[in-house]
Image: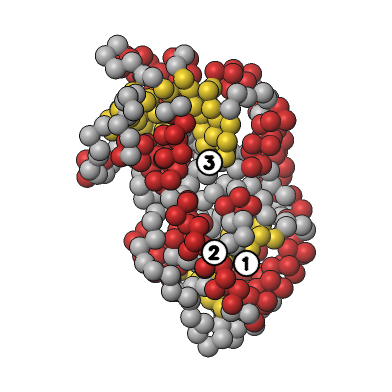
Amino acid sequence: MESKNIFISAFAAHPNKGSEFAVGWNIPYQIALNSNHNVYLFIGTFEGNGFGKFDGLDKIKLPHNLKIIKVYPDFWVSFFNYFNHRFKIGFVFYFALRRWYFLVKKEAVKLSDNSPPDITHHLGPIGFREPGYLSELNKRHFWGPVGGLAMINLDGIKNKNFYFYKSLIKNKINYFQLSSLRIKKVLSKSHHVFFATLDNQKMFLKKHEMNKYSLLSESASKLPNKELKFKKREEDKLKCLAVGTLDDRKNIIFLIDLFRELDDSKFELNIVGHGPLSPVLNRLISKYNIQNVILHGKVSYDQVDDFYVNNEMLLLPSHAEGNPNVVWEAMRNYTPVMSFKMNGMQTSLEDRGVLINSLSYKENLKNWKSKLIEIQETPSIIHDFQTKIFKSIINDTWESRGNEIIKLYNE
């Protein structure tokens, strides 16, 4: 196969960070590793705390056909991003990001003089709001995986607090932004669009016409590094795990309320992570003298696997979620996941995890409690999920994601 020049804009890229960093790094890396195409990866940060930071890049061994193009911020990028970081005005980040993608286009045009692209690919961040400018190079253009359209079930929020009204407004803004003329223009120039979730794909199809499209999770698993070993039950206790940022979207207080109602001699919850709700969780555990919930705080990336190995189930009650890294980290260690049936979960978990419809907060507590009791009383349920994960996880590695894209590049 004749080699092609592939221009990919990713902004955030790192092999050991969250979903948007992971897709920005692993997909270009796998494309370069498993094809003879020349991959030019345009990035803005390796840290996620600003623009133009590339810490750790020199320590990573790159395939010879993967070229990193560092795109530094100009005055306007730094100006908008200042308000994002200094005053936590999150929406101005998109102005900074749009300007940064304009700078990517300028760098791509310069690079085209010596290495003209055959294909352009706007990879990330995965949110649908900012499709970049690489499509304006008028080459065969790919976009995605496209995410960021997760609609939050407002009935599932415990109280009508600030987060409730913020979610209400965000739902409406998402629907409004989906109709943007800029998105319509980029779609018309895109040879193929990848969607991160089935929900995102359905909503786009209601609003826009597209040439070709398919599902492609924005996250994936590393290859399992061990043989399947069925998890052993200790003292008839079901040990569960929650991993991630402790904020309102992750719905961690729901798990506190849930485990308050469960027998602490039969159920245990280990929470790994930190965030704005950390002190709140500590107060609730102390106030209600909850014996079966343990907060472990922030844990290094290298240590997280031990928690997956030593727990039987990952609980992910988020109000909105695409395909977060924790799902694939869990399944890589043959730990099944329990989640609401929404967004990316219904595609990623299929029949190898527990999916529960999101209803009212009270009904959700009742349904999760009922399911956990069933799992605790029937250990074979966990073993069945582990077997299904073992048979299917090879189709959900970063290598398989990259090969899927290479196949479409080669058409």
Q: CA distance from mark 3 to mark 2?
A: 20 Å
- Residue marked by disc 3: 216
Residue furthest top as drawn: 113
Mark 1 closeness class: few <14, some 14–19, many ≥20 residues within 10 Å: many
- Residue marked by disc 2: 388
Direction from residue 355 to residue 389 in the image, left or right: left
Q: Earlier in the sequence, mark 1 or mark 2?
A: 1
Q: Are marks 1 and 3 in contact (CB under 8 Å)?
A: no
Select label 1 or label 3 by which is in front.
3
Query: Which quadrant of the structure image shows residue 63?
Result: top left
Select label 3 or label 2 by which is in front.
2
Residue 136 lies, in percent from the top left, at 48, 15
Query: Which quadrant of the structure image shows residue 11?
Result: top left
Q: CA distance from mark 1 to mark 3?
A: 30 Å
Q: Amino acid at mark 2?
A: Lys
Q: Amino acid at mark 3?
A: Leu
